[in-house]
Amino acid sequence: MEVIKTDIEGVVILEPKVFRDTRGYFFESFSQREFDEKVRTVSFVQDNESMSSYGVIRGLHFQRPPYTQSKLVRCVKGAVLDVALDIRKGSPTYGKHVAVELTDNNHRQLFVPRGFAHGFSVLSETAVFQYKCDNFYAPQADGGINILDDSLGIDWKIPVGKALLSEKDTLHGWLKDFDSPFYINEPLY
């Protein structure tokens, strides 16, 4: 597994070593030992999967303390643009984001630490998206930043007229009005 640093400390892209032959391919999608050595020690406790069609944009979601989550995400069918937005007070990269295309061909994964909002847009006809979380889902701790907030500078790569958004996601507030419960000096995991 190769770990690729991004412009935001703690957010990393993981690229597995894929072995291909005439039968197809094989790769190790997750190794706790290798993750702990190369990224950081995180204990994942819940795996989630979603299926979405072209134009769906989900996010930008997070869970408030004490239910915050780190996520390791990947697209196992199709293609998505995955986004991690820094929402930690005092962070030099507050309000900045990392966007990376995750596909069933590149097998890349993105590690999204605690203190980040997360979202993705579906670029293929359909996409199956999986993510590991280091804390259990707590509906009472749901939070989000509005995916339509132009100040974020996110190009979701979906024409506005083709975007499929949930009502819940369009009701989240703008970043400028957000009082973040996350701080830069808190651990990212």
Image (cartoon, rainbow, N blue to C red):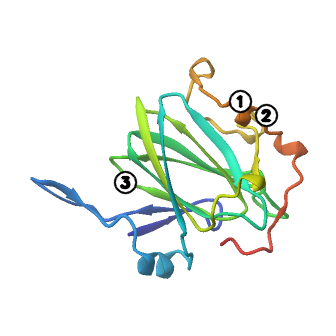
CA gap, disc 3 to disc 2? Answer: 33 Å
Give the residue at the far top of this rendering: 161
Q: Residue at x 62, y 35 (%)?
A: 155
Query: Three-letter amino acid code at disc 3?
Result: His
Query: Within the image, what quadrant is residue 183 found in?
Result: bottom right
Label pair 1/2, CB-CB below 8 angstroms: yes
Percent x, y of residue 74: 45, 53
Q: Dot 2 corresponds to which residue?
A: 171
Q: Quadrant of the N terminus?
A: bottom left
Provide residue 122's location: percent of width, then percent of height.
Answer: 50, 35
Question: Which numbered disc flags the more N-terminal residue, 3 or 2?
Answer: 3
Is residue 66 or residue 26 the one in the foreground?
66
**What type is the residue that disc 2 sits on?**
Leu
| Location of mark 1 (residue) | 167
Vertically, is 161 above or below 113?
A: above
Q: Which mark is residue 107?
A: 3
* Lateral position of residue 99 relative to residue 78, left or right: right
Of residues 30 and 140, the one nearer the viewer is 140
Quadrant where the image shows the C terminus: bottom right
Dot placed on the residue nearer the N-terminal end, 3 or 1? 3
Residue 155 vs residue 54, the one in the foreground = 54
Residue shown at the point (42%, 43%) measured from the top left:
128
Q: Label 1 amino acid? A: Glu
Q: What residue is rendered at 77% in x and 54% in y? A: 140
Q: Which mark is residue 89?
A: none
Q: Residues within 10 Å of mark 3 (few under 14, many from 20)?
A: some
Residue 33: image x %, image y %?
43, 81
Whole-angstrom CA distance, mark 3 to mark 1, is: 31 Å
- Report the side of 11 relative to 32 (left or right): right
Circle 3 SS class: loop
Query: Is 6 in front, or is 184?
Result: 184
